[in-house]
Amino acid sequence: MTTKPPAEEAEPITGQAVSVNMLKGGVGKSILALNIADRLSIRGHDVLFMDLDPNGHITESLGYADVFADPTHDLTNIVIHEYGEYEEYIYPTDWEWDFVPASVKLSTLESELSENSITLLKKNFIQTLLDDGRYDYIIMDGGGEWSHIAKAAYGAAARTIIPIPPGDMNRSGFKRTYKRVVQEMPDELNFRILAIVPNMISEYIKHDKADRRLLESLNRSDTFAKYLPSFARIPPKEWDAIDDGEVEVPKPGMRKNSNLENALEEKKVPFGRYVESQDSVSENDRLTLEHLDELARIVEREGVTNE
Ligand SMILES: Nc1ncnc2c1ncn2[C@@H]1O[C@H](COP(=O)(O)OP(=O)(O)OP(=O)(O)O)[C@@H](O)[C@H]1O
Ligand SMILES: [Mg+2]
């Protein structure tokens, strides 16, 4: 009889692409995608991060505004016309991982991709790079629209991480994402959710507010609870104990942390690099980093494991 090694010692499953997506703006797709890519790289993997959101926000925040404005940086050439070399699209960064910035020409890619050709992003770019062994992981920021590019990114990765902040609008964005994306992916893709990440949580969950409603409904859901990282998981019986004042009120989920935003917008660095540069690390920053590392670990294991 062979015994399974403990999850912590399991070999990372490399050769994967992951899209961080949700059909709703401002939920944390870009910030999570960037920081998961960075944490995977810190963990010793070869990582490519792709900004496939035509708004180019993360590309500009990372200091690649000139590439964004450059009409020759056009993925259409290689993805659709199979013309050019990968190197032309891939930029080194200061943090070991490589980057494919967005550009104004993503709109051309969007218009040239059709329902029949959305597999080309996978075939002519992502899968080739993975098969070549150039990268252990390709992480994509796929934008918030149900566009051809987003479909191509979803399909190319067949693995997604979905951030969801509290509030009714985000809830309907999540429902839309689940219905249109997850349920409608062709079976042969073996599409799977790696994690659902309650994001920007700020309230105590003792009170019946949007934060609690999000966390409680996900945790009580037969369909979705299994996708929650351990930092967002509260078993059903614990909710009663919380209400009865029997346990200390936990602070689950990816918490709102302004340093997550400041690191990128002001210091122009991934969050972990900002934390490393501090003389002392606040409790909030330490937790945020721990949660990002758990998300990196979830990618390495192709999903949440119940440790
Ligand atoms: N946990 C968090 N704590 C604090 N700020 C956060 C958190 N998550 C995201 N943000 C901030 O919220 C804003 C929206 O996040 P982000 O840009 O990553 O979302 P998005 O889903 O990519 O948005 P868009 O659809 O516009 O591309 C950003 O300013 C980001 O820094
Ligand atoms: Mg974004």
Image: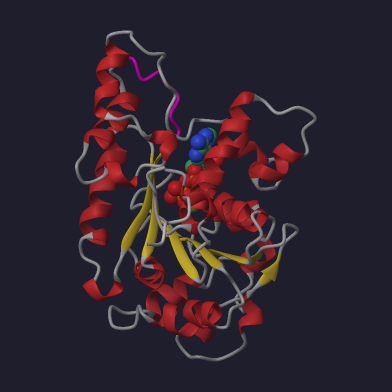
Determine whether, in the image, residue 95 is placed left or right of residue 43.
right
Magenta part of the chain: 199-207
Residue at horizontal 70%, vertical 37%? 275
Q: How many marks?
A: 0
Check the image and name the residue furthest to the top. 245
Q: Is residue 297 visible?
A: yes
Q: In the depicted view, which residue is nearer to us: 73 or 260?
A: 260
Where's residue 84, x and y in %? Answer: 60, 89
Judge whether 208 appears above or below 187 on screen: above
Check the image and name the residue furthest to the front. 1
Per the image, is 203 magenta?
Answer: yes
Determine whether, in the image, residue 279 is placed left or right of residue 146.
right
Give the prevailing secondary structure in the magenta stretch: loop
Q: Is residue 142 visible?
A: no
Determine whether, in the image, residue 86 is placed left or right of residue 200.
right
Residue 47: quarter of image: bottom right
Quarter containing the N terminus = bottom left
Where's residue 279, x and y in %? Answer: 80, 30
Q: In the depicted view, which residue is nearer to us: 287 or 103?
A: 287
Judge whether 302 appears above or below 267 on screen: below
Where's residue 34, x and y in %? Answer: 57, 53
Determine whether, in the image, residue 238 is placed left or right of residue 73.
left
Per the image, is 169 magenta?
Answer: no
Residue at horizontal 42%, vertical 59%? 302
Quarter containing the C terminus = top left
Q: Tell me how the rendering is colored.
A: secondary structure
Judge whether 223 appears above or below 202 on screen: below
Where's residue 289, x and y in %? Answer: 60, 39
Q: In the depicted view, which residue is nearer to us: 205 or 115?
A: 205
Judge whether 7 appears above or below 165 on screen: below
